[in-house]
Amino acid sequence: MTVHMVNGSGIAVEEVWRTDRPVRSGAWGEAVFSEDGELLFYAARLGPQPIYRERVRELYENALRFTWERGYTDLVRMWNLIGDITGPNAEGAEIYRDFCVGRAEAFATWEAQFPQLPAATGIGTLSPGIDLCFLATKQGRTVHLENPRQTPAYQYPSRYGPRSPSFARATFLHGEQTSSLFVSGTASILGEDTAHAGDIERQTLETLRNIDVLVGRDNLSRHGLHGYGYAVQDLDQVKVYVRDPEHIATVRDICAQTFHSETEIAYFNVGVCRPDLLVEIEGVCR
Ligand code: 3EB
């Protein structure tokens, strides 16, 4: 999958998911996938649409059907990369909200098979249309987490959109040798409200604090994961999404002070799903 997330002044970022098992790859309709019998990675693109919800519903329903029929019963981590994310669709509704309706409808249809929502990212890209990709796994290895500092996104009230966003704050994956904690795109949201509108430094610090609490020992044991616990510095494969180019240097400085020098961090200058959110950060704890 090729996604337009860096501009001419950025360095292209390549993401490769590796496994020790033999991999089978293929195409299914418009989608492509790779699987190793334990994990499935699936990717599909929806081109620009006047109205997204019906086509997003179809995109998601096709993805969920394929995943279920191949025996990958548990979703782990999804990425939704959305062109002109806070811009209007042909009816004047925000594209992100339009997208959320189609996604919520697909999950409602497949609720019997996929009752639990996984960790996800919903973020802007520089091209119109929507890219979806995700990891799914065989039964019984995932635990989905919420953050005590934040309202579950699937319970956001309707002032944030007619259908709330379908995702969990993080997903823990019990691997065969190691475990991973996939942290969703995280922003400066407390409860359901944006905190520190207009202040990039405080939004970045609040985002990092949200992640620290989310991955901490107390929150993991609250979700039945006893004996596990991380801190924000344990995040790796970090992706930092910054809306305004003039804020990138500030965010880089704060991240440099927060993360280890070896931590892999990629920066993207893209839109965020609320006009007042300036930054969003995700990663994986191992
Ligand atoms: C938030 O907390 C910020 O719609 O899949 C973060 C992660 C956000 C995922 C999504 C949206 C999504 O609401 C936005």
Image (spheres, rainbow, N blue to C red):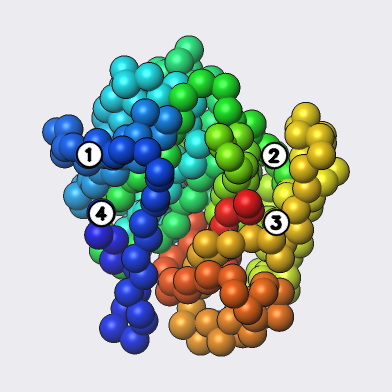
Residue drawn 63% across the image and 52% down it: 286
Q: What residue type is labelled 1?
A: Ser
Q: Name the residue under label 3.
A: 211
Q: The residue tagged with tag 4: helix, strand or loop?
A: loop
**Mark before the other along the chain sequence, 3 or 1:** 1
Query: Residue 282: x and y, percent?
Result: 56, 58
Query: Residue 240: x and y, percent?
Result: 53, 68
Q: The residue tagged with tag 1: helix, strand or loop?
A: strand
Q: Which amino acid does label 4 sit on?
A: Met
Viewed as shown, does residue 123 lie left or right of 59? right
Distance between the alpha carbons at the discs numbered 1 and 4: 13 Å
Res 146 label: 2
Residue drawn 59% across the image and 70% down it: 263
Distance between the alpha carbons at the discs numbered 1 and 2: 33 Å
Residue drawn 34% across the image and 86% down it: 9
Question: Depth-wise, is mark 1 or mark 2 nearer the camera?
Answer: 1
Q: The residue tagged with tag 3: helix, strand or loop?
A: helix
Q: Which amino acid does label 3 sit on?
A: Ile
Distance between the alpha carbons at the discs numbered 4 and 2: 29 Å
Q: Can you say whether 236 is above or below 286 in the image? A: below
**Mark before the other along the chain sequence, 2 or 3:** 2
Q: Name the residue under label 4.
A: 1
